[in-house]
Amino acid sequence: MEESKETKETKETKEVKKTTRKKATTAKKPSEEKMEITLDGLQKMIAKMVAMAMANNTPKEENVSEKKLTKKKGKVTKADLHKIRDREVTLKSANDMCSFKSNKTNIMYSWVDENDEETMTVAEILNMEAKSKKFLHTPWLIMIEDYDNGETIKMIVEALGLEKIYENLVDVDELLEKDLCDIEEILNEASDDYKEVVASKIRRKVVDEELRDIILIKELERMLDKTFI
């Protein structure tokens, strides 16, 4: 029996709707597609942030010179000495008669014989340096280091530019006990003024017959360009 035309159309309509429903079920909704894109971008953003955080936490190799890492200590100046002007230092005579009268305190300091000692404040040493550099640069006077003034003397030496003098400063008796090559090396490094002090002491030792070694005397004459006998 043939189906009526109306019934046949109804069936066809239902089949079309059914097929459309299936297609709609398999297709992604626009809102779902947008959500997936957003999550994907968020994941990439999080990954990028994690990578940046790890890079920031990784210790960087420091390429800094030792000169920049270590703060350079400034040179001691006379201004620094004025801050310690009341500290005291003992000075001994490196030669014969020497004296200094302070124009600040009117105190007279006198060294009559070699190795005589006088104690002065740093302030008075600065006054003496201002009057004449020969006191400390020849040197006529030598600062004596003891158990508690080593740092003070070091500051004075640096501020007044006495480094080379004190590096090569040696007692004449100790000098004469050294080998000839060592004596010559020391005298070559010494200032002309200090050589004069050494020559004066050697001359006195020769006159007093404390120094009798003719070979040594002749070598000292050559080194110092002096005549002792």
Image (cartoon, rainbow, N blue to C red):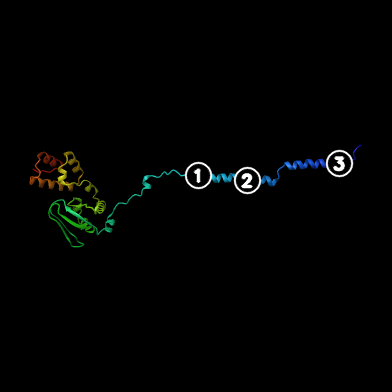
**Percent x, y for residue 116?**
14, 54
Is residue 167 placed above or below 101 in the rendered structure?
above
Q: What element carries label 1?
A: helix
| Residues at marks 2 and 3 touching, judged by CB atoms closer than 8 Å | no
Q: Residue at 64%, 44% (x, y): give it.
A: 37
Q: In which quarter of the image is residue 14?
A: top right
Residue that label 1 marks: 55
Sequence-wise first label, 3 or 1 = 3
Q: Which residue lies furthest to the front in this view?
A: 147
Residue 9 bears which disc, if any?
3
Q: In this view, does 69 lie to the left or right of 49?
A: left
Q: Quadrant of the C terminus?
A: top left
Sort mark 3 into few (<14), some (14-19) or many (20+) by Cα contacts within 10 Å. few
Q: Is mark 2 on a helix, strand or loop?
A: helix
Sequence-wise first label, 2 or 3 = 3
Q: Is mark 3 on a helix, strand or loop?
A: helix
**Percent x, y for residue 62?**
42, 44
Sort mark 1 into few (<14), some (14-19) or many (20+) by Cα contacts within 10 Å. few
Residue that label 2 marks: 39
